[in-house]
Amino acid sequence: MALPLVAILAMIPRTLPLWQKSLQEAVSRPSELLELLRLPREVLGSTDQARAAADQFHLKVPRRFVDLMEPGNPDDPLLRQVLPVAAETTIAAGYSADPLEETGKDPAPGILHKYQGRVLLVLTGSCGIHCRYCFRRHFPYPERGWNHRDHEAALECLRQDPGIEEVILSGGDPLSVGDEKLADLAQELQAIPHLKRLRIHSRMPVLLPERIDGAFLRWFCEGRLQPVMVVHANHPRELDGEVRSALLRLRQRGVSVLNQAVLLRGVNDRVEDLKELSEGLFEAGALPYYLHLLDRVQGAAHFDVPQEEALQLVARLAACLPGYLVPRLVREIPGAKAKVPLDLASALLAR
Ligand SMILES: *Cc1c(COP(=O)(O)O)cnc(C)c1O
Ligand code: SF4
């Protein structure tokens, strides 16, 4: 007897890893997010403008991240990072679509070589979350994963340049690519003798801690290259128990774990929050690395914390924490040889 197609499909075992399922179930409609948090539509500001903001860069947030938000609080620091609001359509002077002037700078598609000794491989335009302040919000990255053939040219660039010691997998979020493809890529990289370190820049360990599973840890930790993971958490509440244990799993497998955050108005612009963030990271075996001043990307002006205020804030942080828990306050300046650290001296010496 012939079975209907649905019955046959139901018999195929589910092979999708847990994290991919969680990604598929992410919240993508602002109205649903507001409902989940029991918030009125007015939180969005002008309806037309809020819709324009959501059309330009659509809402995407995993459900477990929503679970960490406080219901009924329109100013929740986690909500502010993801909710498309009318303010994004304000045109602000000094803000552009490509503040880092990255467009057209690649030696091969998917490779960015700005700093000596390390290159960034852009594996995908896809992320597990859409952060409203992201400078990549206007980039025409295709929403598809790493494709080996497309990137053969990028690998060839790496093989040809013995000055490169570290490869940084980036995106989008490189961990939105599946482990089979990533493991293949890691093998290719290990075969390049002048490479020493393999670094990943990802928000996934904080968003979906289940992403740090056995399949991932195998290819990332068991190879020849020294593993470094730079995660991205902005607020201490992002570091719940599951996230902390994911970071500890990395640490226990010999990964150096660092965090980069962006200083954001209404999210983490208070000393107490930054202090708690550093302490939470350290409890999970991670160190704060960079605190970025906002990249001046069009649509993000309402997140800006002026440089002078940022300096005061980090100086106060430095006055109450050990040096290793104070992130470096940096700004990206097009053409600079590295991220540019801001000098805390006068803020620290002021009486
Ligand atoms: C930020 C960045 C890096 C990494 O810089 P580090 O200071 O080593 O963390 C590398 N390449 C590019 C293009 C970058 O933007
Ligand atoms: S690249 Fe990073 S900051 Fe930008 S949207 Fe993706 S996860 Fe957020």
Image (cartoon, grey):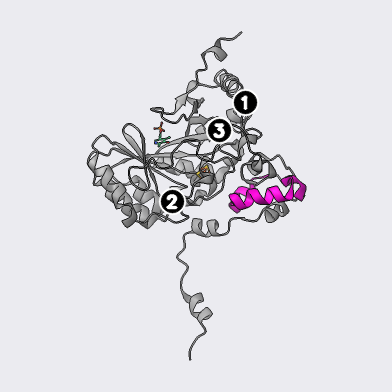
Foreground label between 1 and 3: 3
Foreground label between 2 and 1: 2
The location of residue 197, given as percent across then percent down, is 32, 38
Q: Determine crowd level at label 3: few under 14, some 14-19, many 20+ residues with C-alpha closer than 10 A.
A: many
Magenta region: which residues? 41-69
* Image mark for residue 117: none
Q: For the point 24% across and 47% down, which residue is it?
A: 191
Image vertical order of residue 25 relative to residue 326, above or below:
below
Q: Main secondary structure of the magenta part?
A: helix
Say which residue label 3 marks.
294
Q: For the point 64% across and 32% down, which residue is it?
A: 265
Q: Determine crowd level at label 1: few under 14, some 14-19, many 20+ residues with C-alpha closer than 10 A.
A: some
Q: Is residue 314 left or right of residue 256?
A: right
The amino acid type found where label 1 is placed reads Val
Magenta stretch encompasses residue 53 = yes
Circle 3 sits in a helix, a strand or a loop, which is it? Answer: loop
Mark 1 and mark 3: span between their CA atoms? 17 Å
* Image mark for residue 124: 2
* Image mark for residue 271: 1
Residue sitting farthest toward the top: 351
Q: Determine crowd level at label 2: few under 14, some 14-19, many 20+ residues with C-alpha closer than 10 A.
A: many
Residue 186, visible in the rendered structure = yes
Mark 2 and mark 3: span between their CA atoms? 22 Å
Image vertical order of residue 54 relative to residue 289, above or below:
below
Do labels 2 and 1 touch, CB within 8 Å?
no
Q: Is residue 202 left or right of residue 93?
A: left
The amino acid type found where label 3 is placed reads Leu
The location of residue 62, given as percent across then percent down, is 58, 52
Mark with earlier residue (2, 1) = 2
